[in-house]
Amino acid sequence: IRGLKVEKDLLVDMEPFFDSYKAIMPYFINESPAPAAERIQSEEEAERMAHSSNCILCACCTTSCPIFWVNGSYLGPAAIVQAHRFIFDSRDEATQQRLGIMNQNTGVWRCRTAYNCTEACPRDIPITQLIEEVSGAQGPAVITQQGLALAVEWFEHITPVLAGAEAKALPQLTFKNIKEGAAPVAAGEALGF
């Protein structure tokens, strides 16, 4: 299994995999008073997270990911799928915290859409699609300097030099702007390119 340290024979150290899993807070968070009955979801709301709920944490997707092979700090597809499950759970209240984790340089911006993860999944979960949904859920939130660098590289296939740039110098840059092609121009102007 690539990306995980071999202990002996077919035994690998799964700690990095489970550390990534724990980092996304894979548990239900809701501080609201509990209702008298269950916390009800509509069928549409339940369907939104149906694929990500099917993950069995086998690590096939993560160990098939070339980014994970090269960069062990990348959360990996399985952790992002687990984050998806809670980000799109209408009953959970920690969406913004999880999106903040996903917006780090070890999160969704590292994915290069190789589709190895989707092909490796024994449960036929559309992992790449779920990763794209999580990156799209970043919405109008301002992207961090690291997130900006990775997003620009991804959408424009370039690596801008952001050394010394202040996040406050890039106030209007959002995920939507980058997808629409406005951010590279704005980033270039803001950074003097």
Image (cartoon, rainbow, N blue to C red):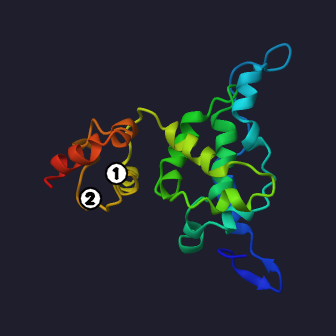
Q: Nearer the viewer, residue 127 or 168?
A: 127
Q: Amino acid at mark 1?
A: Gln
- Residue 153 position (above or below residue 126): below
Q: Which disc number belongs to residue 145?
A: 1
Q: Amino acid at mark 2?
A: Leu
User: Left or right: 117 with respect to 70?
Assistant: right
Percent of width and height locating residue 169: 22, 44
Q: Quadrant of residue 36?
A: top right
Quadrant holding the C terminus: bottom left
Q: Which disc number belongs to residue 162?
A: 2
Bin the neighbour count of mark 2 within 10 Å (Cα to Cα): few under 14, some 14-19, many 20 and up.
some
User: Left or right: 72 with respect to 159?
Assistant: right
Percent of width and height locating residue 99: 54, 41
Q: Are marks 1 and 2 in contact (CB under 8 Å)?
A: yes
Q: Nearer the viewer, residue 164 or 120?
A: 120
- Residue 83 position (above or below residue 153): above
Query: Residue at the spot x=79%, y=19% of the render?
Result: 40
